[in-house]
Image (tube, coloured by chain):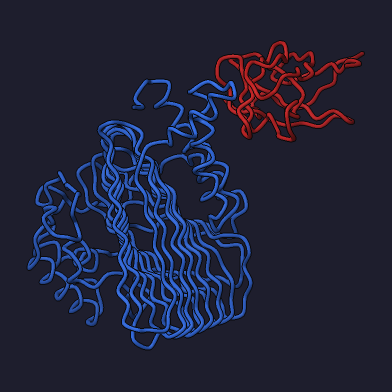
Amino acid sequence: MTALDHTAVETIQKDQPDWRASQIAEAFAAFQAQEVPTGAEEEWRYVELDFDLDALTLAADGGAPMAPGPFLETALGGAVGKIQIIDGRVVDVALDSADVSVKRLAEVDRIELAAPVDRDKFAAAHLAFATDGAVVSVRPGAVVQAPIVVDIQATQPGTITFPHLEFQVGTNAEAALIVVYRSPDGLEAVAVPDVVLTAEDGAQLRFMSVQGWAETTTGLVHQRLHLGRDATGRIGEVGLGGKVARLDLWVDLEGAGSSAEVVGVYFGEDNQTLDYRMTINHIGRNTTSDVFMKGAVEDYAQSVFTGLLRIEKDAVRSSAFETNRNLVLSEHAKAHSVPNLEILCNDVMCGHGSSVGPLEDEYLYYLQSRGISRARAERMLVRGFFSEVIERLPIDSLAEPIEDAVFRRFTQAQEEGRLS
Amino acid sequence: MSWIQVVEAKRIPQGRGLRVEIGEHRIALFRIGGDVYAIGDRCSHAEASLAEGDVFGFEVECPRHGSAFDLRTGEPQALPATQRVPVYDAKVEDGLVFLRIGEE
């Protein structure tokens, strides 16, 4: 059991090639130079991290794997490959396609990072302390319809782990990847995954992640999507678990004609914080983006959505839209929604919409006037609210288990009388 | 009329239905505790699959318009549906579900 200190860094550096050892030294310096966010920073507003970073230790080896849950079982059903990352260690790789290859972090000569080390203390920690990870590559021109599934788990109490994942879809190739984040019930731990998705020119990439951490685990995910010329990226984000489940997402529309769609659904209960911070960078001309996030919170849960659409000077003829809709179902639940635009170019189409509120009284009244009980009317409205976003998730096979999980959360809150 | 073996009981999720087709019959199966109930899958109000509805007590709620039906009698319990849906005899033996389809 080692803390995140000099001794740990030196131990890790010993087994590394020179380039990586010096990278670790720089990352560790950046780690030491930054403070744990307190919530006073704009980027961390509304978020309270209640763990003591100094008391956390690095995981020794990968712990005992958990049995597959409902999402994973469904995902694995039609999968073309499976990767298991436990406490930051890759413990299993199984592939059914010659078009896909997986390298471990020790086999690569550069590491891609979603977040620069000065983004926050955790991004720096990731680069300094990640010792293993998977780099998944899809051969140019290959069409791999079935998804590759990555099962990322945190299993050891009191640890902070750094799962690392890169997914590179080659020129004109098509591929899909699903990540499921999990931890056993009651596990107090912190996970800091870093996920880099790259769609080369003309590639089509689909990605979905399900944050299904235990409600005592904190997950702080940094994730970035790079899009080449005429590339398409479709991202689906599902937020259910986690004490604090945060996603920092950057989408870089670098190539001309590239397009990105980000669709998300989340449902917070107890005193969870589900935190989404997105930046969509339109860099190339003729680029298109659409962000569509819908969520609900009940009990003492809160959700945060901040979305920045940034249109660079050369990104002419770009179009960018973002929508965030929130249902606040209990008196003490909160949803914060802050869409932003930063436009440096005058030939663009941009739009944003955001709403926070309870189920519409008028709709409830209408349904009740047709002889439907209030409880039933509420269930119908909630189902309708979410079906619109669940239908747009990029990987169809997960739609049903996600709809079930979301709806079950609602009916449970309803039965236990937590709705206001 | 004889009993027809249809499916393993454990394949029917708790709280949700499973649709099976036997001849021209589209049937929604539900499991509550150890018992299985079988009713017509098509909601009597509009085209919707009751197997996709949610179960509260002995009622299934149509996912499209909120009509509810009693799983034991097929009688509607909530508007907009006003007509009952067919009910089929179902039993579980050795973990297998058997149905008896009448003239209904």
Q: Residue at x 32, y 70 (%)?
A: A341
Tell me which residue sits at (48%, 85%) in the image: A256
Could you say which is closer to the camera, residue A389 or residue A190?
A: A389
Residue depicted at x 17% and y 60%: A42
Q: Where A264 sits versus B28, above or below?
A: below
Q: Position of residue A283 (x, y in %)?
A: 38, 82
Can residue B38 be seen from the camera position used here? yes
- Judged left or right of residue A79, residue A355 is left
In this rendered view, identify the residue nearer to me: A375 or A76: A375
Q: Which chain is red?
A: B
**On screen, A18 above or below B80?**
below
Q: Nearer the viewer, residue B81 or A117?
A: B81
Q: Which lettered chain is shown in blue?
A: A
Q: Is residue A209 visible to the viewer in this orientation of the structure?
A: no
Percent across and percent down for residue A203 are 55, 77
Residue A357: name its quadrant. Answer: top left
- Answer with the quarter of the image where residue A414 lies: top left
On the picture, is A332 further left or further right than A102? left
Q: Residue furthest bottom?
A: A314
